[in-house]
């Protein structure tokens, strides 16, 4: 048994102190990273509570419940940024990447410490599949919101559509890797493929923004 709160404190305190000596984009990214770690812990609390209330098994929780809870928790700070601070697209994307990286890092640390994984292959899977998946899902959400804002489609249906895309991607990954075999291999490859596709989409958004200016 591990205490996730203690792990969060051990990682977060040095980062908070380092922010005193940082400025600009690095400081904002580090803040988003810390927010992502906090969201990861809160998501675990919420998922655990709902699992007990609904009396769900671990597999059902991972496939049906966790994607909605976790992507919903990532969605909230993005909405705060989008509507209250109204950042530029570059700052908004950077915040999304920081949140996803912080979420993935904290979740992987807790998983490895609790499971005691010794095989390098499992560690690489956690980093390159699960870790990348969290970044891809929140980045897809952010880029969808950016595109909706740019084309003046930032309405309630547009926001729900962007959230549904992120939650579906997350749930599909959990479903594929829930049992060993070819489906798990496909699931492990999806995050990398999604990251490449999002990179191409992001570069296209940047080029369209440069043409408008």
Image (cartoon, grey):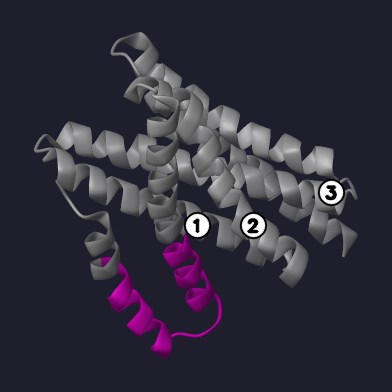
Give the farthest residue toward the front. 53
Q: Residue at x 46, y 55 (%)?
A: 39
Q: CA distance from mark 2 to mark 3?
A: 13 Å
Residue that badge 2 annotates: 78
**Quarter placement of the C terminus:** bottom right
Q: Residue 185 appears at what percent x and percent y?
A: 35, 18
Q: Are marks 2 and 1 in contact (CB under 8 Å)?
A: yes
Magenta extent: 11-35
Query: What kind of element bears circle 1?
Result: helix
Q: Earlier in the sequence, mark 2 or mark 3?
A: 2
Residue that badge 3 annotates: 154
Residue that badge 1 annotates: 99
Q: Residue 46 appears at what percent x and percent y?
A: 44, 44
Q: Earlier in the sequence, mark 3 or mark 1?
A: 1
Q: Residue at x 35, y 21 (%)?
A: 57
Is residue 193 visible to the viewer in this orientation of the structure?
no
Q: Main secondary structure of the magenta part?
A: helix
């Amino acid at each position: 048994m591990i205490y996730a709160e203690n792990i969060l404190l051990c990682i977060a305190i040095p980062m908070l102190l380092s922010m005193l000596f940082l400025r600009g984009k690095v400081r904002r990214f580090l803040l988003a990273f810390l927010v992502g770690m906090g969201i990861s812990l809160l998501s675990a609390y919420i998922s655990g509570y709902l699992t007990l209330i609904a009396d769900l098994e671990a597999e059902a929780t991972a496939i049906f419940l966790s994607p909605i809870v976790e992507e919903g928790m990532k969605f909230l700070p993005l909405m705060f940024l989008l509507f209250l601070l109204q950042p530029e697209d570059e700052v908004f994307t950077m915040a999304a990447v920081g949140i996803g990286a912080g979420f993935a890092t904290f979740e992987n640390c807790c998983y490895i410490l609790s499971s005691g994984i010794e095989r390098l292959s499992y560690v690489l899977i956690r980093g390159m599949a699960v870790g990348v998946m969290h970044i891809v899902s929140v980045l897809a959400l952010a880029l969808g919101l950016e595109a909706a804002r740019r084309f003046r489609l930032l309405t309630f249906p547009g926001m729900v559509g962007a959230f549904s895309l992120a939650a579906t991607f997350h749930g599909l990954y959990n479903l594929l890797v829930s049992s060993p075999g070819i489906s798990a291999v496909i699931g492990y490859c999806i995050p990398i493929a999604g990251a490449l596709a999002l990179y191409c989409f992001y570069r296209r958004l940047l080029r369209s923004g440069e043409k408008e200016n």
